[in-house]
Image (cartoon, grey):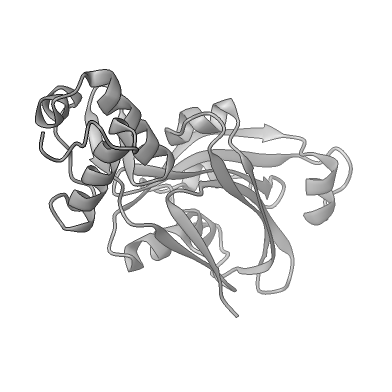
Amino acid sequence: MGLIDRGGALAIWRQIAQAIETDVAGGAYAAGAQLPSEHMLADRFGVNRHTVRQAIAHLADRGLLRVERGRGIFVRSRSLDYAIGQRTRFHEIVRRSERAPRREVLEVIAVVPPKEVAADLKLADGAETWRLIAVSSADGRPVGTSDHYFPRSRLADLPAVLPADNSITTALRRLGIEDYTRRWTRISSRPATAEESRRLGLKRGRPVLVTESLNVDPDGVPIEYGVTRMSADLVTLIVEH
């Protein structure tokens, strides 16, 4: 309780936030570690839980903490450096950061893609694609959700050859495409939609980094159009030359 200056100019909840931030910076709580409960923090600072909740919400909005309903309060892990280059491979990027990658495929369905997607894939009007929708995680924490479009006429067996880890690179290799490269990537940002927030465990309106990209085979023929939305709190994009 001695940490709190009840007669000071700084609001009590801000003092609590500063104290917790000092704890994290000093190594009392490592990245990914769980903090004491709201009740325990309220006892520590001699305040009610509402005041503690204000401090936690402030630190969560700043990206220092994350609150998981039913589980507790955790120190956010360090940002994932996500390199975008000639060969951009999710599983490889995450493993290089010494984390465990995971891609959960939510569905694979045959669709006629939007006109701009069909144009980039050089498909005729009405031609179908496989649309693969996925959520990608690092160490069990969702970092991105993505939509991938593949020409169905060329990759008819794509759903059947996806491996257990849902690696797109492995699936394409099984279909005879040994390599593919990034032709272009378009990067933007915006607030997350309700569905993106649900998939990524974000507060509604938190920012996401959006990448639209086109991958081609060794002959330069388009094989994948992708749109990925990544949590701006958890991912740093790095453009390689």
Q: Quadrant of the C terminus?
A: bottom right
Which x, y percent locates residue 88?
A: 53, 66
- Which residue is more in the foreground, 189 or 158? 189
Residue at the image position 34 percent from the left and 47 percent from the top: 64
Q: Residue at (29%, 58%) from the top-left corner?
A: 99
Which one is nearer the viewer's eye here, 53 or 200? Answer: 53
Foreground of the two, 180 or 117: 117
Residue lying at 55% horizontally and 57% vertically, measured from the top left: 175
Q: Is residue 40 above or below residue 63?
A: above
User: Is residue 88 left or right of 187 when viewed as pictured?
Assistant: left
Q: Quadrant of residue 115?
A: top right
Query: Could you tell whether 7 is left or right of 107 in the image?
Result: left
Q: What x and y, as percent, mark residue 63?
A: 40, 45
- Residue found farthest to the bottom: 241
Residue 132: % across, % down = 58, 40
| Residue at the spot 42% in from the left edge and 33% down from the top edge | 201
